[in-house]
Image: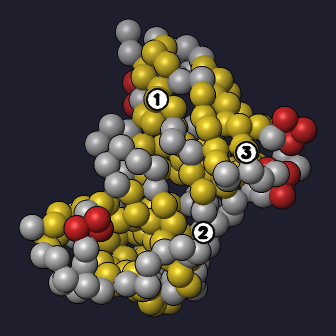
Amino acid sequence: EVQLEESGGGLVQPGGSLRLSCVASGFTISNYWMNWVRQAPGKGLVWVSRIDNDGKSISYADYVEGRFTISRDNAKNTLFLQMNGLRADDTALYFCAKGDLVDLWGRGTLVTVSS
Amino acid sequence: EIVLTQSADFQSVTPKEKVTITCRASQSIGSSLHWYQQKPDQSPKLLIKFASQSFSGVPSRFNGSGSGTDFTLTINSLEAEDAATYYCHQTSRLPLTFGQGTRLEIK
């Protein structure tokens, strides 16, 4: 079965860090661009970052630039998001999503930033 | 940034009704517009890619049209299982953006 599974979310204090992971199964991520998209509780979808097949082309939304780092380990079929300097407004369900078409999403991992 | 504005935040509709949701882009995006369905407590699912191409496995009652700045998602003969929030999404330019979402309530 083709799927994505995120992990690494949790409760963190403002200013803290988390590292999210997304493991793919049923397909090889090295063939695809990969994305992170987030959704605050009760709100809409917001794109966070994307990375090309071999990690050489990376883009971020302005509000995470300089705080978040996207990376990938194609050998482990895994996507990452290192999040530093977390703020309350980063609280959201974080989805990883496959492809420049964003045609497959994981179930998400919840990040809560609160003191 | 390209802003996508959907025609309504909420629509209450009856089964078998034909539903239309529109998405307007703040500048031309060609056909790089896609539609997603998100049911409560689920991840989004791709319905329509590149404005009018049905994604694999999507029921034929879902159709998309448009180009440039104006796009439409049409659901023919609405079914109870179509209760969800629908989002448009552009991949023409960075940053990638989504519409605010349209929640469909089935009466």
Q: Secondary structure at mark 2?
A: loop
Q: Secondary structure at mark 3?
A: strand
Which quadrant of the view contains residue A17?
A: top right
Q: Amino acid at mark 1?
A: Leu
**Picture residue at 57% right of the left edge, 60% below the top:** B96
**Picture residue at 49% right of the left edge, 19% below the top:** A10
What residue would you read off at disc 3? A25
The residue mark sitting in front, 1 or 2, is: 1
What residue would you read off at disc 1? A110
Lower position in the chain sequence, tag 3 or tag 1:
3
Chain for numbered disc 3: A
Asked if the residue at tag 2 contacts the one at tag 1, i.e. Cβ–Cβ closer than 8 Å, the answer is: no
Label 3 and label 1: CA atoms lie apart by 21 Å
Q: Is residue A92 visible?
A: yes
- Tell me if B1 is positioned left or right of A45 in this view: right
Q: Is residue B28 visible?
A: no
